[in-house]
Amino acid sequence: MQTNHTRNRVFITGLGTINPIGNDVESYWHALIEGRNGIATLEGWPTDKLTCKLAGQIKNLDLDKHFEPKELRRTARFSQIAIIAARQAVAQAGLAPDRPAPGDRPDGVDRDRVGVSNGTSLGSFTDMVEQILSGGPDHERVSPFFVPRMLPNMPGAALAMEFGFRGPNDTSVTACAASTQSIGNAMRVLQHGHAEAMLAGGCEANLSDWGISTFAAMKALTTRNEDPEKASRPFDRDRDGFVGAEGAGYLFLETEEHARGRGAEILAEVIGFGSSDDAYHQVMPEEAGTGAALAVEAALRDADIAPDEVGYINAHGTSTPLNDKAETAALKHALGEHAYRVPISSTKSMTGHVLGGAGAIEAVATVLCLTRGVLHPTINYETADPDCDLDYIPNVARKKDVDIAISENFGFGGQNAVVVFRRYSP
């Protein structure tokens, strides 16, 4: 237990993800370093009236192989993919696969001291639309599962029930910064001794004709429908909007004492977290990147590192004209001249934008880059933009050992969140 003068160190012992370019960590990793595109024409809904017809959808997913029919009826898709990804992280961390009875510790882990920190953005927007279109407010036509499927906190609750984690449980809904926020929140819980382990991450699954049309109405989405492979192009001069996507990612975090006490394999360490708000506009980033820079600076202070110690940045990099320009400005503001020397990549160039789940999926990518000595590329970077003039690792992965990496995400409402990771060396 930490004292008033010290904070527990926080280690990562498990990773899990399902997203448009991989249904598990290894397939995701190979797609990342190969620069494989996960974006295609939206399947499952009509697209003839959509100005953006593209999406990053999970491939080859048979939910019947993961869940009983009763579970599928009671849970929404974002909860389902959260469970699939979290099972991977929990398994890698070495926990027993079956939920133990209260008080039982088949793997030496006290579930009363393990919590969940989840991030998501829209809840189950698709459930809301389907229920509204199903025939109005007549209670006989309203599904009894509507509310428990729809609520944003339900994936976190589902994860607690899945694994029997009875510790702290919170849900961040800070738009596209949500799951980065959830990782930072989990780190704080562990640093201050309120739990011994936390399952932290996020999920989003709201792809549909309605889901896409809502963002298209704001002119936020690409219209490069004729060329899905090239549609998501962060920091490129010809970027014209993001591509919506679905997915989930989770990290199993433990205090140093807990991880070492049970002999867990340590992958990396979470050492800093910062958050801020632009206090500027509902959906537009502040052009000078001042608010986002505050979050980067706060994360570095929290990690007690200097800007020139950052060896890699996994950027928010949405492929929208304003966001990528503002993010570049923020990094120059926070890192000074070192911003020109640090390699940066955008996972969204391959996955599309998973909204509230993006930060967790990208945190998994960041940890993999740290642990495996290869930095994944930003694909589709073809034409330089004078407003985006940093090193975005264009198109080809780069072999490089780095000790410190940051992952950053920024959301509607001016929400900014940044986490700092350190490579683990015994």
Image (cartoon, rainbow, N blue to C red):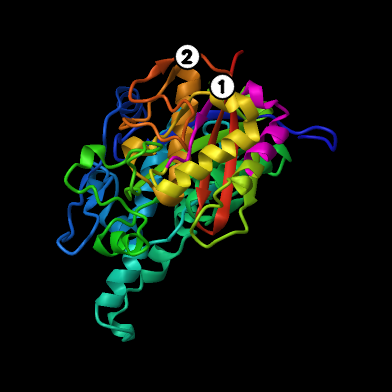
Distance Cα–Cα, label 1 vs label 2: 9 Å
Q: Mark 2 points at which residue?
A: 400
The residue beneath circle 1 is 311
Q: Can residue 195 be seen in this view?
A: no
* Location of the C terminus (image quadrant): top right
Q: Whole-percent x and y of residue 393? A: 41, 24
**Residue at 47% of width from left, 14% of height from top?**
400
> Which quarter of the rendered picture does the N terminus lie within?
top right
Q: Is residue 298 above or below residue 400?
A: below
Label located before the other in sequence (1 or 2):
1
Pick out the residue farthest to the front: 386
Relative to 5, say whether 176 is above or below: below
Which amino acid lies under the numbered mark 2 shown in the image of this protein? Lys
Question: Left or right of 265: which side holds 21?
Answer: left
Q: Give the range drawn in magenta.
A: 295-317
Determine whether label 1 and label 2 are within 8 Å by CB.
Answer: yes
In what element is the residue under mark 1? loop
The image quarter containing residue 214 is: bottom left
